[in-house]
Amino acid sequence: MSGKPKLHYVNGRGRMEPIRWLLATAGVEFEESFLEKKEDLTKLQKDGSLLFQQVPMVEIDGMKLVQTRAILNYIAMKYNLYGKDMKERALIDMYVEGMFDLNELLIMYELQPAEKKDEYFANMMDKAENRYFPVFEKVLKDHGKDFLVGNQLSRADVQLLEIILMVEEWKPDILPKFPLLQRFKARLSNIPTIKKFLQPGSQRKAPSNDDDVDKVIKIFFS
Ligand code: GSN
């Protein structure tokens, strides 16, 4: 055994991508095992690897962790990306939960039926631009520091950068309306481990195409 965490999921972003981001930011090398077909999921379910029969699952430190938030909590705690006290942690949790809500909207877009996609897209972008991005712009302004919470990098910063980049893929002109987020993006993207993760060839996943979506539907929803 290599000792590296091993991530079990499809070869796409979904719920695993924030986990990949956090590990990469912490400078932790990880291995991935991709589900390619429904039988790969069934096998993990049958051999008792998945507590709730679901992925993401991460093998780490002798555990088989499931539940995205539990996995992220563990990694954040282990690599000191979870604030310095309970109050900082409460703020981090609050910001991150907002990001999860927006992330859920983004990852479910591809799975919408064709006739609903335009309406769904408009609502998703409206929420990004008029609900979530203004909140994080204000948090940075009020806090007046380089990071969302305290004086050091936390999981909230990492997840915010991930979500900014994702929203920008859909709406490339969004960021000039949020100057502090724009500067935040530039700053964070320059942290060496993040810079490396942003380069081609890293384990960061590309946006999904139609074939990826078909595969995900076959594995999880058929
Ligand atoms: O956050 C979590 O990890 C869980 N609360 C949800 C995980 C989940 O819904 N996993 C789905 C795949 S969809 N996105 O990741 C899953 O494994 N479904 C298989 C099944 O048989 O339920």
Image (spheres, helix red, strand yellow):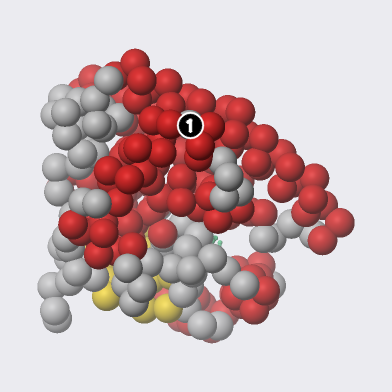
> Relative to residue 110, is residue 87 drawn left or right?
left
Regarding residue 187, the answer to whether it shows in the image is: yes
The image quarter containing residue 182 is top left
Assign the N terminus to one quadrant of the image.
Answer: bottom left
Q: In front here: 193 or 208?
A: 193
Q: Nearer the viewer, residue 153 or 22?
A: 153
Is 72 placed left or right of 193 in the picture?
A: right
Residue at x 51% of width, y 26% of height: 134
Residue 174 drawn above or below residue 192? above
Residue 203, position in %: x, y?
34, 71
> What's the residue type where badge 1 is placed?
Phe
Q: What kind of element bears circle 1?
A: loop
Q: Is mark 1 within 8 Å of ligand 1?
A: no
Q: Is residue 13 left or right of residue 84?
A: right
- The residue at the far top in this view is 142
Q: Residues within 10 Å of mark 1 (few under 14, many from 20)?
A: some
Residue that label 1 marks: 178
